[in-house]
Each structure stands twice: as structure tokens, then as C-alpha cells.
Amino acid sequence: MKLLIDGKVILALFTYVKKPEKQKIMDWSAAQHEELQLHAIATLSSVAPLLIEEYMSCQGNARVLAFLEWCESEDPFFSHGNSFHGTGGRGNKFAQMRYSLRLLRAMVYLEDETVNTDLCEKGTIQQMIGIFKNIISKPNEKEEAIVLEIQSDILLILSGLCENHIQRKEIFGTEGVNIVLHVMKTDPRKLQSGLGYNLLLFSTLDSIWCCILGCYPSEDYFLEKEGIFLLLDVLALNQKKFCNLILGIMVEFCDNPKTAAHVNAWQGKKDQTAASLLIKLWRKEEKELGVKRDKNGKIIDTKKPLFTSFQEEHKIIPLPANCPSIAIMDVSENIRAKIYAILGKLDFENLPGLSAEDFVTLCIIHRYLDFKIQATHKQRELANKSWENFLARTSNAKTLKKAKRLQEKAIEASRYHKRPQNAVFHGTDIKGLNTTVPSGGVVTVESTPARLVGGPLADTDIALKKLPIRGGALRRVKAVEIVDAPKKSIPT
């Protein structure tokens, strides 16, 4: 880093981040200069986040924003697009725009308040929205992949700038909401076609979360423009990668009293309602998690109504005191808690378009919180019982020996007893050990010097199988009779 600072590398790289100067004698051809320019911007994307002070001292934000203005302008520029960095930029400025936005995105996501405040004061939010609107007004199917990447980066930059800042969300305003709605109206078939559409949709959902939620005028405008309908349309595509994020957004939107009417008014294919869709997603999630239900969707195991196959298999997993239990982690790792929260905002009543099976599942969803509290207490009780058993084994010799016998019996029962003829059996147990933890052929005792106890395995059946290399290793200590040394005669 010191070498980069002393060499003023950031400043040197920024000498290329500017529009081509007319009527200036250059040592490079246009193609060579373009390649150097793109390399410089790509290098800045990696180096500038490590040298924030140097970046700011060079007026980095102002330079990049000015360069983006040129990228968006109508100035004639015939790029060659021959290099790796110039891919997709032949005859246009898309390559320069793409790498400039990557640089801005890298700086914004440092979450350095000095950098982000400077960007906002220079009108970055308005400029990003303007670039996005300009791009969508001139569709370019030939360079679709690079255009989608540019749109995704713009939305991510806006998300990084607006998150947790109400004033910046207000600047994002209705014009920002309009570009979000434009993406949400994308043909669903394209969302499943690759080419960066999935990334664009993720970036759009992120911008809803960071730029719209929490700003009531933007929320109301989003609702007025049928934004909830568009979210439910995407949710109905049944794409698991989007479900968790969309449901999380809807949970937050449900704090707005105007949202419930929009959710209840939505209709999908075959007149499917939002409540029916959410209940269908619940059943699908429980099926994937391995939750036990009968053919009618009723609870089979009343003692563990929400337990998944993973929880059944792993039973009790020891965790540090500051870590949440599996029952708690389950809340954030699947969509059931979010579906419960949304339906709870709708009061679980007067939900249209439900079948008999839906009503059975709705009853289970309604009791989700009670079941979760029960599961949390159950796991806590099992963890406490496990701890009590551990204390009993480590403080009572009889209990330890009993646990050891049960463990050996369980190990023996799990072994394969039909052995081929003339097969050699290699034992993995060390006889004579009074422990209930898995043990190998090497045991280290650090508390007591080996010369006093005869080595860590002195009292086991393998103690005499090897001779010690250094004092006190694998040998038994036998009681020896200590006799007085013969007295030496003292010459007189």
C-alpha cells in the first residue's frame, strides 16, 4: 500500500478517466488509448477501495461522475471494443460506462460515510436515475447483456446510498419508483432466460427494500402504481430464489395500512388469491423441509408440529451460549415465519378463494407462534437435560461406568457382524479407558508429568506393547520396594 501511495498510482490512473481531448497530439492510437483507459478504470475498481484518502484527495467522485456524463452524452465516439475490457462496447460508450459504474459501486459499498455523503452532495442519485431512464428509452437488443449489467449496477449504487437515510430516499422519490416499476413489469419469460435478468431482478428487489420502504410518500406511490400486484406476480412464478426476499418486502409493506386492500384485491392465474398463494407456498416449504403432515394437511406429531427432518436427524447440537438454537435459526432460514407475519397482518379472517385444505393449513399457520414457542422450550429442556447428564458422568464414577457400558453396547449393536471368512478384524477401541468420548490410539495428558504416572496409557491393555522412546511413555508403573542403600565403610 505504501508503494502505491508514494507512487501516486491513484492519481496516475485517473489521468485516463476523462473524455478524449480533441486536436491533441497523442502517442497512442485511438484503439490503444481506449484499451489503456478501460484498464485504468478496471484497476481503480480494485485499488481505490483500499486507498480511500488518496481517492478522495484526487476528487475521485467528481472525476467519475463527470466521465459518466460524457458516457451518457451524444458526443460522437467510435469505440473499437477490441480488448477484453471493451467487450460489448464496439461503436458505443457502454464499456466505459460499465467500468465507471463498477468503480462507483465498489466505493459505495465500502459504507464510508465521507464517500457516500460526497456522492449525494454531487447529485449522484439524480444522475443515476437519469442514466437509467435514458438507457430504457433506447432499447439495445444487440448489447442486451451489458445493458442489463449497467442497470443492475445503477440500482445497487442507489440502494447503497439510500439505505437507512430517509432524506436520500425522498430524493429517490417517484422518479426512482418509476424505474423500479419498469423492471418489475419485465416479461416473466425473460426472468427465466438468464442473460442477467435474474441479477437485475435481485437488484430491483434490493432497491425496493433500501430506497422505498420506510419513506411513506414513496410507499404510497408504489402502492398506487400497483407495485404490490407486481410483487405478487413475481412471487406466483414460484421461483424459490426470489420468494424469501419478496416475502420480506411484503412483511415490511404490511405495516402500511393501505397494503392489505391491495393484497386482498390481487388475482393470479385461474383466479388465485394472494392468501391461497401464500398457503400454497407454506405447504411446499413444509414438504421440502420434511415436516410430517397427513394427506389432508393435518398435524401428525402433535408434540412436534413444526419439526423438520433436519431437526429430527440432528437432535441436540451443542452450541455456545451466545448462539441461537435450531428452533430460532429456523425462523430466518425458511419462509414460514414471513408467511405467518403477512397473514397475521390480514387478521387471518375473511380471506377469499380458499379451499378446504387451505383452511386446514391456515389453522396451522395461525398457531405457528404458539408451536414455535413450544419447540423452543422443548429444545431448551432437552439441552438442560443433556447438560445434567454430562455433569453426572463427570462427577460420579458409577454413572460414568454405566454410560460407558451403554455406549459400548450401542457401538457393538451398530457393527456389521457377518464377516467374510479369513477376514482380519482390526479393533478400534482401547480397552480400559473410562471415557464416553470417541478416543484414538493417542491420548495426551498435559496436567501430570508422564514420569510420575508411567505415561498416558499406563493403565490400559496396550501399555506394554511398545517400549518408551523417551522417559515415561507407554509403560505400567509397578509398586517397588524401596530399600536403604548399603552403607559405605568409612576409612579410619
Image: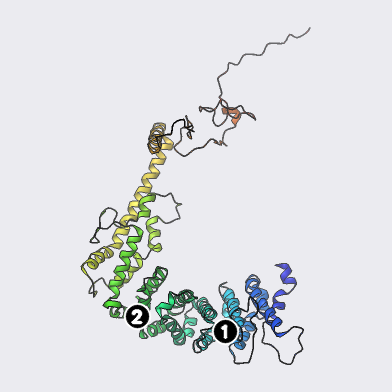
> Which residue is farthest left?
356
Residue topped by disc 2: 229
> Residue 406 at x, y = what percent?
38, 35
Viewed as shown, does residue 229 lie left or right of 446?
left
Mark 2 and mark 1 in contact (Cβ < 8 Å)?
no
Q: State which mark lies toward you, 1 or 2.
A: 2
Q: Can you tell which quarter of the image residue 84 is in?
A: bottom right
The amino acid type, in three-letter code, at marker 2 is Phe
The amino acid type, in three-letter code, at marker 1 is Glu
> Residue 88 at x, y = what percent?
58, 80
Viewed as shown, does residue 224 lie left or right of 477?
left
Disc 1 or 2, which lies upstream in sequence?
1
| 164, above or below 301, in the image | below
What residue is drawn where x is 29% and y is 79%?
A: 267
> Residue 478 at x, y = what percent?
55, 21
**Quadrant, the C terminus:** top right
CA gap, disc 1 and disc 2: 35 Å
> Which residue is farthest top?
492
| 30, above or below 391, in the image | below
**Label 2 secondary element:** helix
Residue 213 visible, this orientation: no
What residue is drawn where x is 48% and y is 35%?
A: 428
Q: Residues within 10 Å of mark 1 (few under 14, many from 20)?
A: few
- Disc number for residue 448: none
| 429, above or below 43, in the image | above
Q: Can you tell which quarter of the image residue 348 is in?
A: bottom left
Residue topped by disc 1: 121
> Residue 395 at x, y = what percent?
42, 36
| 442, above or below 26, in the image | above
**Label 1 secondary element:** helix
> Which residue is farthest right?
492
